């Protein structure tokens, strides 16, 4: 027995790109087949090679007039035209033109009017992606069902290889929709060249592609095809005149080890792709642990919903200490979860799932209100008031959400705004979707202190300081941990304090655990430290006892 693909006939919808000089610089396989050429044969030719005589001469004149700015081009309108095939015969087409404003390239999307019947009678059920001309997800499911139905275990395996492009990584020009479409077509062209009699390519979603492979050899790893895909996408693309190096995730799964039915195999390949993206785009094959992790996340999310309803969250407080006097000057509010089955959980056990959930909005608002109320209560019994530092979730970092939540917490508690520090991690700030400049402007208007957390651990920290109105940054614990490993960390810490002084910013050093470290930080010029030398994070009652305020633990 041998495998055979479900019949589709030749691809019919095509894409041709013409550069500013009127020469063809991209042809997808569908367009090449429409006109009877090999896929690379048309590259470098003028478009008139595809236009019947005598219209070709007229078209050349019009094209030159358009290039000179003398006539407009019918962009975005469907027109009926006739095309010339390689053998001289003509074909009736619908054509729609789109222009890339930056490069001047024109993309022609071609749809034949004399569509042969029978060869694509299944096109409604198993569709075609209009951008690339590739079969789409419906076609993948249909073909996979058919291939699995005839699979002979003795002849090998059926594998899916999912690829997802991150088009924005490394080049903001790709955020332009026209550039995005051009990039996806270019990716499709490269990947389509990897098709063989045993390998078929499909489009999946906005940025995804899927290879369906009939594999004759063990083990269940599509090694050779994976290597070809990696090589094809690792080579740079050109975008808006600049080289673009893509980032992309790759996940794969094979039948029958990872699923005997189409739905199961697709789901498990998608899980492998998600794991690849979480592992900084390292190619990843499906294994049962992926499913176990997903099930654990589902259970954790379910328990988090119950925790919100049952008020199982608690706040612990870790003091921040003046390095010169040893006085407690501030407290950082830290979230804990008292799980009914697992006991007290630290953030590492649940924070990733909570942060990705809409629940983080409700929990984050509660943290703000609880921390402000508690510290305002303590400050009523202190001669020198404390400041409280509160971390925010990524979903809270929104112009219409976080400022309103802060103002409500301040109004309810009576805590002055200058006594509240909002700690924002760099990964939130550098996400273009957050529109961080607008959010920072709204936060500044509330009067609270803005702090850049975990400073120095990411590549954009200095940019964040330059662009946004932060008043303080926290030195990440990793720098303090490394001070005895060599002179490098000490030099970095000294330079960070010098930077803060030059910019007029405050600093907090995390991870201070010994008197020796505290003395070094004082010598470097830091004023405030936080760490186990003075205290671990404390429950409200224990923190009140440490502050000499026993009996004032709970907000009123």
Image (spheres, rainbow, N blue to C red):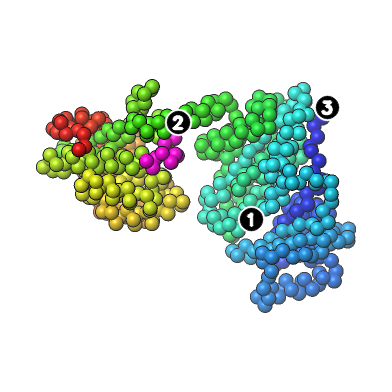
Above or below for 412 versus 444: above
Q: Quadrant of the C terminus?
A: top left
Report the Cα–Cα distance between label 2 and label 3. Answer: 48 Å
Residue 96 counted in the magenta span: no
Question: Does residue 185 appear left or right of residue 487 in this picture?
Answer: right
Q: Residue furthest front?
A: 309
Residue tagged by mark 3? Answer: 1
Image point (19%, 42%), residue name = 376
Q: Give the foreground label among 2 and 1.
A: 2
Q: Residue 281's spot in the image, x, y percent?
A: 55, 39
Report the magenta stretch's main SS: helix
Q: Which residues are magenta?
A: 353-362
Residue tagged by mark 2? Answer: 302
Q: Tag 3, which secondary structure?
A: loop
Q: Residue 272's spot in the image, x, y percent?
A: 58, 33
Report the Cα–Cα distance between label 1 and label 3. Answer: 41 Å
Q: Residue 180's spot in the image, x, y percent?
A: 59, 54
Above or below for 33 versus 540: below
Q: Earlier in the sequence, mark 2 or mark 3?
A: 3
Residue tagged by mark 1? Answer: 182
Image point (74%, 62%), residue name = 95
Q: Residues within 10 Å of mark 3 (few under 14, many from 20)?
A: few
Q: Quadrant of residue 351?
A: top left
Q: Are marks 2 and 1 in contact (CB under 8 Å)?
A: no
């Amino acid at each position: 027995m041998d495998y055979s693909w479900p019949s589709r006939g030749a691809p019919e919808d095509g894409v041709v790109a013409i550069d500013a000089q009127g020469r063809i610089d991209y042809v997808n396989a569908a367009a090449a087949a429409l006109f009877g050429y090999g896929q690379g044969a048309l590259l470098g030719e003028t478009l008139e090679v595809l236009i019947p005589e005598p219209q070709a001469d007229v078209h050349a004149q019009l094209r030159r007039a358009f290039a000179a700015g003398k006539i407009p081009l019918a962009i975005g309108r469907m027109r009926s035209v006739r095309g010339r095939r390689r053998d001289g015969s003509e074909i009736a087409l619908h054509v729609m033109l789109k222009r890339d404003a930056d490069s001047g390239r024109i993309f022609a999307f071609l749809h034949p009017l004399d569509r042969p019947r029978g060869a694509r009678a299944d096109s409604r059920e198993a569709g075609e992606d209009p951008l690339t001309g590739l079969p789409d997800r419906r076609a993948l499911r249909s073909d996979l069902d058919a291939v699995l139905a005839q699979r002979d275990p003795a002849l090998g395996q059926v594998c899916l290889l999912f690829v997802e492009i991150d088009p924005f990584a490394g080049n903001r020009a790709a955020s332009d929709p026209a550039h995005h479409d051009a990039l996806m077509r270019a990716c499709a062209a490269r990947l389509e060249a990897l098709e063989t009699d045993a390998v078929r390519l499909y489009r999946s979603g906005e940025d995804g592609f899927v290879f369906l492979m009939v594999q004759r050899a063990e083990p269940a790893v599509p090694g050779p095809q994976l290597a070809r895909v990696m090589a094809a996408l690792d080579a740079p693309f050109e975008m808006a005149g600049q080289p673009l190096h893509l980032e992309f995730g790759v996940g794969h799964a094979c039948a029958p080890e990872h699923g005997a039915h189409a739905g199961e195999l697709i789901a498990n390949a998608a899980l492998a792709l998600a794991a690849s993206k979480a592992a900084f785009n390292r190619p990843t094959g499906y294994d049962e642990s992926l499913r176990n992790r997903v099930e654990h996340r589902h259970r954790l999310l379910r328990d988090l919903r119950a925790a919100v309803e049952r008020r199982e969250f608690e706040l612990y407080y870790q003091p921040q200490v003046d390095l010169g006097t040893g006085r407690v000057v501030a407290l950082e509010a830290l979230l804990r979860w008292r799980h009914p089955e697992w006991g007290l959980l630290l953030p590492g056990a649940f924070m990733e799932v909570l942060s990705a959930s809409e629940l983080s909005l409700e929990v984050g608002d509660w943290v703000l209100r609880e921390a402000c109320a508690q510290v305002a209560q303590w400050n009523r019994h202190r001669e020198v008031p404390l400041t409280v530092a509160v971390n925010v979730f990524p979903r809270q970092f929104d112009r219409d959400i976080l400022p309103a939540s802060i103002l409500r917490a301040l109004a309810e508690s009576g805590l002055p705004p200058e006594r509240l520090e909002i700690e924002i991690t760099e990964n939130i700030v550098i996400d273009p979707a957050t529109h961080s400049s607008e959010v920072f402007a709204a936060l500044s208007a509330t009067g609270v202190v803005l702090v850049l957390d975990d400073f120095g651990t990411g590549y954009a920290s200095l940019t964040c300081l330059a662009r946004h109105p932060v008043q303080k940054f926290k030195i990440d614990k990793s720098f303090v941990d490394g001070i005895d490993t060599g002179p490098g960390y000490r030099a970095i810490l000294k330079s960070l304090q010098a930077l803060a002084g030059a910019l007029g910013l405050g600093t907090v050093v995390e991870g201070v655990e010994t008197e020796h470290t505290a003395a070094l930080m004082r010598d470097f010029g830091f004023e405030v430290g936080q760490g186990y030398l003075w205290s671990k994070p404390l429950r409200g009652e224990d923190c009140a006892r440490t502050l000499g305020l026993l009996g004032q633990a709970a907000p009123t």
